[in-house]
Image (cartoon, coloured by chain):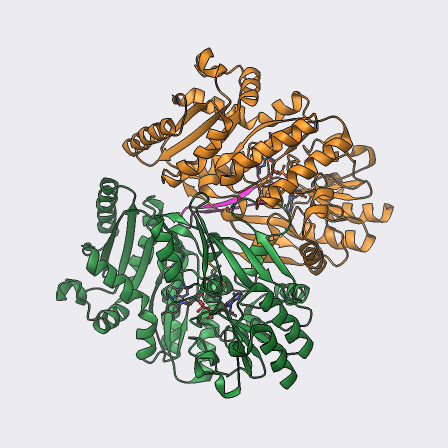
Chain colours: A orange, B green
Amino acid sequence: MGDAAARFAEIVGRTHLLAGDQVSEDYAHDESLTTEPRKPAFVAKPATAEEVAALLVAAGEHGVPVTARGAGSGMSGAARPREDGLLISFERMNSVLEIDTGNQVAVVQPGVSLAELDERAAEAGLSYPVYPGELSASVGGTVGTNAGGMRAVKYGVTRHNVLGLQAVLPTGEIIRTGGRTSKISTGYDLTQLIIGSEGTLALATEVVVKLAPRLAHSATLLAPFGDLDQVMRAVPRILEAGLAPHILEYIDNLTMAAITYNEKLSLGIPDEVRDATQAYLVVGLENREADRLDGDVERAGELLGELGASDVYVLEGGSARKLIEAREKAFWTAKAAGADEIIDVVVPRTEMPGFLAEVRELATAAEAGAVGCGHAGDGNLHLGIFCKDQEKRYRLLHDVFAAAIARGGAISGEHGIGHAKKRHYLELEDPAKVALLRRLKQAFDPQGILNPGVLFD
Amino acid sequence: MGDAAARFAEIVGRTHLLAGDQVSEDYAHDESLTTEPRKPAFVAKPATAEEVAALLVAAGEHGVPVTARGAGSGMSGAARPREDGLLISFERMNSVLEIDTGNQVAVVQPGVSLAELDERAAEAGLSYPVYPGELSASVGGTVGTNAGGMRAVKYGVTRHNVLGLQAVLPTGEIIRTGGRTSKISTGYDLTQLIIGSEGTLALATEVVVKLAPRLAHSATLLAPFGDLDQVMRAVPRILEAGLAPHILEYIDNLTMAAITYNEKLSLGIPDEVRDATQAYLVVGLENREADRLDGDVERAGELLGELGASDVYVLEGGSARKLIEAREKAFWTAKAAGADEIIDVVVPRTEMPGFLAEVRELATAAEAGAVGCGHAGDGNLHLGIFCKDQEKRYRLLHDVFAAAIARGGAISGEHGIGHAKKRHYLELEDPAKVALLRRLKQAFDPQGILNPGVLFD
Ligand SMILES: Cc1cc2nc3c(=O)[nH]c(=O)nc-3n(C[C@H](O)[C@H](O)[C@H](O)COP(=O)(O)OP(=O)(O)OC[C@H]3O[C@@H](n4cnc5c(N)ncnc54)[C@H](O)[C@@H]3O)c2cc1C
Ligand SMILES: Cc1cc2nc3c(=O)[nH]c(=O)nc-3n(C[C@H](O)[C@H](O)[C@H](O)COP(=O)(O)OP(=O)(O)OC[C@H]3O[C@@H](n4cnc5c(N)ncnc54)[C@H](O)[C@@H]3O)c2cc1C
């Protein structure tokens, strides 16, 4: 161990290696509610891809498991290090290297936060549209989890917005994948394979992302519905209409009550409407031109009425922003309310009504609560699970995940498997696929030093 | 061999196995100009995934190499079988299984042609936007090559439009990857890894594709420029303007002359304009609403003028369609004109002017010709190479590909590597990446029975 520490310190410089008591609590966990925190033996803060490569080689030689960490805002425990391990924190690799307006891409180091990337893109009239609730998240972390967020309904998830990587293989080789073009048919797509692999295959040391034109005009519609089922049925209809919303979220009445209360947010909805509401749809529209946006808002309003909304509120700038921010904080609200787990299961969007009915039944039978909100346009449901008994909760989650899979969905839409959902994943996934994934892991990481315990045992 | 034939016939039925003289010339090649045709020992036409799996198991046991074939319209020789091999033709697995309007997806068998898929989607007011020039191409083949085409500038390539697969592994296991949702973070993304792997990793037996709303109104603008360089410089500017063209093609004057002559197409361009033109931009715009389209056409016209177009023609329905069709046939035109190779190199779009200048110099030095057209919006250039001497042509292509890679591009944007460009690929690609790709290949196909000789030796 002493030997390893000396090697790591030599590579990154003494001041950028923490060991023992120098390692703060913060590095012991991400935001998963159920993954036990563990302080790593070492935290290294490299400044270059070469340092990352040298760290991996040294870790391999000393048999030290390695976990990558961006901002630690992940929800699956995948950035939770091992006690005997090295945590590579990308906090010093945090430069926006280039905003390339001609190709509409940015080249960034992995430690850059989404907030900073979007700010820098905005200066050029562009935007990075991947927008998970937590804008402190690092670009490298979003590559790790294949993060989604609210705008995925229009712009896709991380996978659809990352064009290329510089990545370090566990064997210490530094490779480049993809590039500044969205079209490449030259060998297997390593970019896509690394995205969403939760730090188990390779570490991204540079990321090329697509930027989208920043549209000047946007509006937010809030539509209360008497019935959750109606909300779910409305979703495909809104997408079929071709209005291309960039936000299409649902919020159930309990969650809306909690987030508006917590954020002291008044939306101007009369009490009698609120009391008769089971769930809300939030529809975000945007356009290059103001009059086109107005036309779309009108059309969306009519459509929501036809689909059963009891009313439609077009929120003004300030309150629209506040509602979206409050929605983004739904996780903290659920956590504060005592949620025992938060999941982000995904089903085809037409399956949402049936699936949510099934979840309600399962929760009732387990004497548990399941409330939430979600990226309805993507069939991605964020549910706070209230169930103290660990074994009961495990069974309930198993049944909920199995129900989603039976409907053509998956355990996680955007948070990943990590440690938190690994047992469920290994129980529910096709063994032939798990075996193939293990062989792929072996092809990247023959010594098994990258994030062992995540995804697989 | 006799044994193998009996096993294959047992699996697919005697009438669906061809051997020896029953195998027609057609199965010996795709549309690659430089890949030697080879008649396979067997052609099997399975009807189900289970039959495909049984064929792969039997082929493995008998040591028979297997090549998949869709429509054989590929340009890299990747569907060219081995003489001792089994060609699995998906021609009987050609059903559109479902058009799911609620989730805006289609579920199809791999042998379905793009033309049929788009026709079926149109009945539901939707479209499958992957549109390579050859609409007889099969969906399975486009998965194999990660096909692109004209509309990729707005809709992305096959990779961005395939959500899920049923696939048969070389070991005979049938797996399902992805689903009807565009968000999944549950294990490594096998869908994306199989797409573009040119039939070397797994065979797709069912494909779930995204469908897009079919927009009612479209227009095509044709802009002649005095200077190819100007055309190339105009491309990023048009994309920055946020008009979201669904077509952004360039056609050089020689290619335009040839395709309009071949297709007897009159575009109403006065002789003096034509004579002063070095290249054309074709800009396709579309919208849900007619007046919005009109606004965009006007804006695009102004912009093209500012960018140096000597004129702008808004083509009417019939001649617009004919021009696009003629452009799609540019390959046949180049072939008929005696092109010795056709490549589809890709560079970041801002690199196009410099790259094309470099290509001209290289071609001149090699006493060769290099003319063409291309998906300019994606930096994807289709160049007909006229150079009879094989060794000279090899050196020229090597230099052209190396120049593209030096500018952050790649050997192929959408056609793939196959047999045709394998030697270049293996010479020019980072050895660490090739080694990793080989290990991935091994993880899927330990016996090496799927399309040996494609991508790797
Ligand atoms: C309030 C709140 C709201 C959220 N809302 C959303 C949401 O709407 N959508 C959504 O998708 N997520 C959401 N998240 C989850 C979280 O923001 C995302 O998972 C994000 O991608 C994590 O980024 P990070 O930098 O914090 O990564 P970390 O948690 O540090 O790491 C995540 C994973 O990436 C790996 N990793 C880190 N850096 C690298 C690298 N350079 N190369 C390779 N792997 C790396 C880690 O090992 C780990 O496996 C939310 C979180 C919170 C707290
Ligand atoms: C005139 C013309 C214009 C063209 N224009 C374009 C263009 O603009 N853009 C573009 O991208 N391409 C273009 N192409 C090339 C061609 O159409 C595409 O490469 C297409 O994807 C090939 O489809 P196919 O069914 O003919 O595949 P094939 O040639 O039969 O096979 C292609 C590859 O896919 C594999 N394969 C076939 N079926 C499966 C399956 N079920 N599972 C896994 N692998 C499979 C094969 O083994 C092979 O490796 C053009 C071709 C022509 C002739």
Q: Nearer the viewer, residue A279 or B299?
A: A279
- Tell me the quarter of the picture where residue A369 sits: top right
> Viewed as shown, does residue A63 lie left or right of B368?
right
**Residue lying furthest right:** A2
Q: Nearer the viewer, residue B366 or B88?
A: B88
- What x and y, as percent, mark residue A192? 57, 53
**Residue lying furthest bottom:** B21
- What x and y, as percent, mark residue B391? 47, 83
Residue lying at 25% horizontally and 72% vertically, measured from the top left: B258
Q: Is residue A323 visible?
A: yes
Magenta span of residues: A95-113
Q: Is residue B1 visible?
A: no
Rendered view: B26 above or below A55: below
Residue lying at 61% horizontally and 33% vertically, measured from the top left: A359
Rendered view: A178 above or below B389: above
- What x and y, as percent, mark residue B338? 33, 81
Magenta stretch contains residue A317:
no
Count of residue discs? 0
Rendered view: A256 above or below B283: above
Q: Quadrant of ligand 2?
A: bottom left
> Viewed as shown, does residue B18 lie left or right of A85?
left
- What x and y, as percent, mark residue A19? 80, 38
Magenta stretch contains residue A105:
yes
